[in-house]
Amino acid sequence: MSSMAWTVAVGGDTTSAVYEPPSAGDEGVVFVCAHGAGGNIADRGTLSCANELRGRGFGVVRFNFLYKEKKSGRPDPMPRLKDTFAAVVARTRAELRPVRLLIGGRSMGGRTASMLAADGFAADGLLLLAYPLHPTGKPEQLRDAHLPKITMPVLCLSGTRDDMCTRELMERALEPVTTRWTMHWLEGADHSFHVLTRSGRTDADVLDEIGRSSRAWWDGLVATRSGAVKA
């Protein structure tokens, strides 16, 4: 299947979305990936993660939230973000009919997907890239109340230098969570998945780790489901 560009209706508005097939392998899994608050459909962070995942056998749908489509810097209210995400997923299902579908994204985009998941939205898994557990410098303002309501499998990738996801607070926030939540810490990475030169790692190393861990997580889910079916 080749790349596709869509105009997606969201109430009385429209936004842009693009699907790109896997660049290696093709197993019918599509990841609908939302950008962060300061990003857009083609920002470097979103695009680099998307391309890494495409190289691991994931088809990826990227899209603009409505405020970015209108070239505004102020994020939409959460209900509007959720409506946009849901509309893009509906279009993805109609156009691609994926065998399996993952939702998630970077920072605010992943948070939006997690809130949809907590509402009971149907998908096969939730992939969170730098989940923003709290605003920078405000660890008391946790965004965790909805996490125990999530029932789908989750992979959350966060850097150990992420100033919006303190490790101790995240581990505490996950204590009441009962779903299959895999927390993967990227050593030395910040909220943008950037590492310092003195760490001995490169940003490319971090992307490779994101790709490898995402593929291993997904393969584990598929194997578990296959075993359940055989049993």
Image (spheres, rainbow, N blue to C red):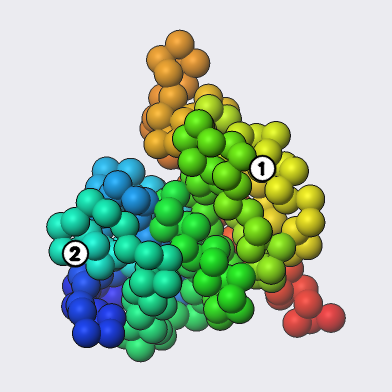
Q: CA distance from mark 2 to mark 1?
A: 32 Å
Observer-nearest of 26 and 165 = 165
What is the quadrant of residue 178 in the picture? bottom right
Hey, which residue is sitting farthest top in the picture? 198
Hey, which residue is sitting farthest right in the picture? 231
SS state under label 1: helix
Q: What's the residue at 50%, 57% (across, down)?
A: 111
| Residue 177 appears anywhere in the view | yes
Observer-nearest of 98 and 18 = 18
Task: For the N terminus, give its image quadrant.
Answer: bottom left
| Residue 51 appears anywhere in the view | no
The circle drawn on residue 69 is 2
Q: What's the residue at 53%, 36% (across, down)?
A: 138
What is the quadrant of residue 121 in the picture? bottom right
Disc 1 crowd rating (10 Å Cα; few below 14, some 14-19, many 20+) is: some
Q: How many marks?
A: 2
42 relative to 82, above or below: above
**The disc labelled 2 sits on which kind of residue?**
Glu
Disc 2 crowd rating (10 Å Cα; few below 14, some 14-19, many 20+) is: some
Residue tagged 1 = 170
Q: Position of residue 93 (x, y in %)?
A: 40, 84
Q: What's the residue at 50%, 80% (across, down)?
A: 99
12 relative to 73, above or below: below
